[in-house]
Image (cartoon, grey):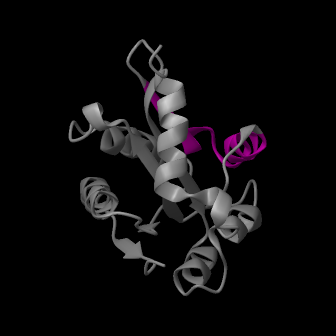
Amino acid sequence: MPPTNLERMIQLAEDVFAVKNDPDQLDVDQEVIEQLHRIHPATVSEYDDGNGPVAWVLIIPTTSELMYKFLEKEITELELFRQTPQGASYDSVYLCSALVLPEYRRKGIASQLSLKAIESIRKEHPIKSIFVWPFSNEGDLGAQAVADAAGLPLLKRQSH
């Protein structure tokens, strides 16, 4: 029996981010998802083709102070998540991760999910910038497309 979409998405996340080998990254589990939803309900997005998830997007609204600490490598991704205060006024959005199964790539799914989430967050928060820690050329290009479509500047943390 071939793996389900969910199993394939979990494997893709492990292959791309290798979070189990990097304690500085956010290792997403149910507890993290619940905390993200407390920060803002639009932080976690999914596209389901009717057979399970084919795309996941995770974005974290936060403060510009924490954004700059992260970009300057003063704090890790995990610390960015842990230090983002609940109920604060957020002015930055971190494009944390976007995963799309190979046969669904280049269709704009991750960009659409990201833009919808950013639009939802902007209804309540004065977002002035987007930032990213690119893991791939595709991720870098996707982040730029999202920032351009949202009309916001994109700041980047240098890769590993």
Residue occupying the far left of the picture: 106
Reply above or below: 132 against 8: below
Span shown in magenta:
31-47
**Relative horizontal placement of residue 150, taking residue 66 as reference (left or right):** left
- The image shows residue 38 at horizontal and vertical percentages of 73, 43
Q: Is residue 76 above or below residue 117?
A: below
Q: Residue furthest front?
A: 1
Q: Is residue 1 visible?
A: yes
Confirm whether residue 126 shows in the render.
Answer: no
Residue lying at 74% horizontally and 39% vertically, measured from the top left: 34
Q: Quadrant of residue 72?
A: bottom right
Q: Position of residue 93 (x, y in %)?
A: 50, 60
Residue 150: quarter of image = bottom left
Q: Is residue 46 magenta?
A: yes
Instruction: Name which residue lies at 65% across and 74% down.
Output: 76
Q: What main secondary structure does the magenta stretch of the protein show?
A: helix
Q: Residue at x 76, y 63 (%)?
A: 82
The residue nearer to you, when weighing 85 against 46, is: 46
- Which residue is at 52% across, 40% downward? 11
Name above or below for residue 83 compared with residue 157.
above
Instruction: Give the total of numbered labels.
Output: 0
On the image, which quarter does residue 146 sit in? bottom left
Above-or-below relation of 86 to 91: above
Left or right: 148 in relation to 69: left
Residue 155 colored magenta? no
x and y, in percent, of residue 113 in the image: 39, 38
Q: Seen in the image, is 152 located left or right of residue 80?
A: left
